[in-house]
Image (tube, rainbow, N blue to C red):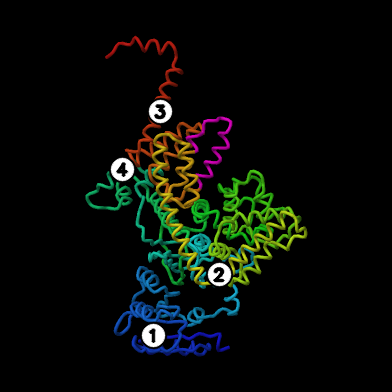
Amino acid sequence: MEDSKSKILILEDDETLGLALKEILSRDGHSVFLASRPDDATTVIATNQIDFLFCDCLLPQMTGLDFIERTRANYPNQRFKVVLMSGIYTDKQFIQEANQKTQAIAFLRKPFEMPDVLKLVAKKEETAKKEEASARKLLYQMFANPKVTNRQKRKVIESIEEVSGFDLPFLYSLLVETKSSGYLNIYNSDGSVSGISFCNGNIVGVDVDDKTTFLGEMLIQSGYATPADVQTALRDKNNRRIGNFLIQNNQLSPHAFDLILMEQMNIRLVRTIVDQKIRVNFASAEVDMMNPSIDADTLSLYLHDWIASKISVSWLKSLYMMWAGNVIVKSSTYREDHPALQMSLIKALDGLSARLNNQVTLNQLLDVKGYSELATYKAIHFLLTKGLIVFAQRASFASPQEQLNALKKIWADLDGKNGFQVVAYLENTGMSASNPDAMLEEFMTLIGDEPADAKSEVHGLWKKTKKVVEEAVSVAQDTNKIDQFRQASQRSEAEAKLRASTLMEEVKKSLLLNQFAKASENLTEIAKLNPQAAQLHVYSSWTKLGMANDPAKKAALLKEVELELLQVPPDERYDALFPFVIGLFNKTKGDVVGARKSFEKSMAIDSSFMPARRELSMLSVQNKKQDVFNMDLKEMVSGFFKKKA
């Protein structure tokens, strides 16, 4: 029993509170140290491995925040969790900054309830479970557990320390769904820190390093303000914020500006969703409600956007490899009129709802004619994130052909990867195993039993796949080889991104000269080198629309471009390029009015953007020709002989 409890250090100069905390924690079976000064606390830390540090923010000698920062620098092997306490520094801004600086798991405003203290230090029921499945694995095990409670979800959220940036949409969704209050702090590998504030399941604040506003562009594109209004506001001599200026001059409604500010929060949230490892911690705290805020309904729209535009298919393939053969079933919250089912990713898969009634697996959905791989993976991820579907039991292979099809999908993802990349790929899956040997054992259940016919194609692929994974797991035991692979992989990735950047400049030149075939060739290469390249999908859409010469293929091409445009992230939609491409899309559809409006928005954002100017000129010429041909003959002839004024 003693092993399951924690070692706790309380650094508090209020003797009454310190003794009360020590008594309640000791009574609960924890080993507790009490210090009233930083130097006394340092002595304890130097000789003990601490699990938790309860620290007052205002101390003799230095602040609590400075003490924590110094201690972490001097004792890097100490992995204690921090709980901050204060009765003086209790404003929202200080709490958020203090949590970010110290990576605190909670901030207790004095006076606080002692039962809350016990909840913070409660250990997992079984240490073995923690060893078998990391917190991130537990996060995604929810996809196969429809009965998980809000309390269990919160425990998983609080235990998470390292995730992928692509995990954040699900994490944001869970924090809103469980009506959590507090601060989610995000620590990137480059040292940047972001903080997301939650109040009773609403996102009320987004603090990121990138302070780009896009306010002027958003106001113009939304139609809430004219370019002239925006320019006048920017020249305001009183330096009022653009929104305040427009509202005070009755050029913008407060409600419309709230919608723009929500979109700004969306853009800042989307920039946290990156393809790299990040550290996170959620600190429960009282947070004041603020407007504008993002509620559950609005978050659904943003989730759809983020999954469509930010999360890569290769990452989703890895995540769902372990569940691709599981039956997908509708959850108790699924209903045919659910708003989520009206969103573009779902509507791109005709008849999906009916298929989900028939014990279908992800592998089977991927084989449906007319279902794109991209839309299928992303639609299923969206529905799982929303909790509308769950994975049920694993379906056994009905035939050798079905096993062969599943193996081909797995092999396509593993082929060409080195040992380090294979293990990294497996670690991203929904496997619960945390060590390489257990991972191999779990992987073998995925590919099924060894096929009986030793001469068959399925048997050969089964053996080849098994061998690659076994060799990768063997390599994973050799730290020197893993380091070599990692360094080589980083070099290769950097070179690929540099090459992609050079090719993108070539694409821009080709498009300005209407050399669409050349642009298409380079874009295909860029997609291989760096699938996350900025504006890749916007330029791809422009290229495809430029090659739309065959009327018989127009419908299929428009559907393809529509899916391409879905993948444009929100922060790439507020320059002259995006409305220009939307204009081309509308023009190809035959919507001349819509095309003109989009080209005009493009020009309003950047009057020097020549492609938009050229398209507007062409539409004007076309319109004049139509006017001449549609003009009454008598009116046209009389016009020639009218006297000039």
Asked if residue 550 lies in the magenta stretch, the reply is yes
First in residue order: circle 3 vs circle 4: 4
Q: Single out the mark in the foreground, 2 or 1.
A: 2
The span picked out in magenta is 544-566
Q: SS class of the residue under badge 1?
A: strand
Inter-mark Cα distance, 1 to 4: 56 Å
Q: Is residue 332 visible?
A: no
Q: Single out the mark in the foreground, 1 or 4.
A: 1
First in residue order: circle 1 vs circle 3: 1
> Residue reaching furthest left?
237
Residue type at mark 1 is: Leu
- Residue 388 pos. (x, y %): 61, 57
- Residue 255 pos. (x, y %): 40, 50
| Residue 618, numbered label | 3
Neighbor class of circle 1 (other Cα within 10 Å; few <14, some 14-19, many 20+) is many
Number of marks drawn? 4
Relative to 510, residue 89 above or below: below
Q: Which residue is mark 1?
A: 11
Quarter holding the C terminus?
top left
Q: SS class of the residue under badge 3?
A: helix
First in residue order: circle 4 vs circle 2: 4
Inter-mark Cα distance, 1 to 3: 73 Å
Do the CB atoms of the residues marked 4 and 2 lie less than 8 Å apart? no
First in residue order: circle 3 vs circle 2: 2
Inter-mark Cα distance, 4 to 2: 60 Å
Q: SS class of the residue under badge 2?
A: helix
Residue type at mark 2 is: Ala
Do the CB atoms of the residues marked 1 and 3 lie less than 8 Å apart? no
Q: Which residue is mark 4?
A: 229
Q: Which residue is mark 2?
A: 476
Q: Nearer the viewer, residue 109 or 131?
A: 131
Q: Single out the mark in the foreground, 3 or 4.
A: 3
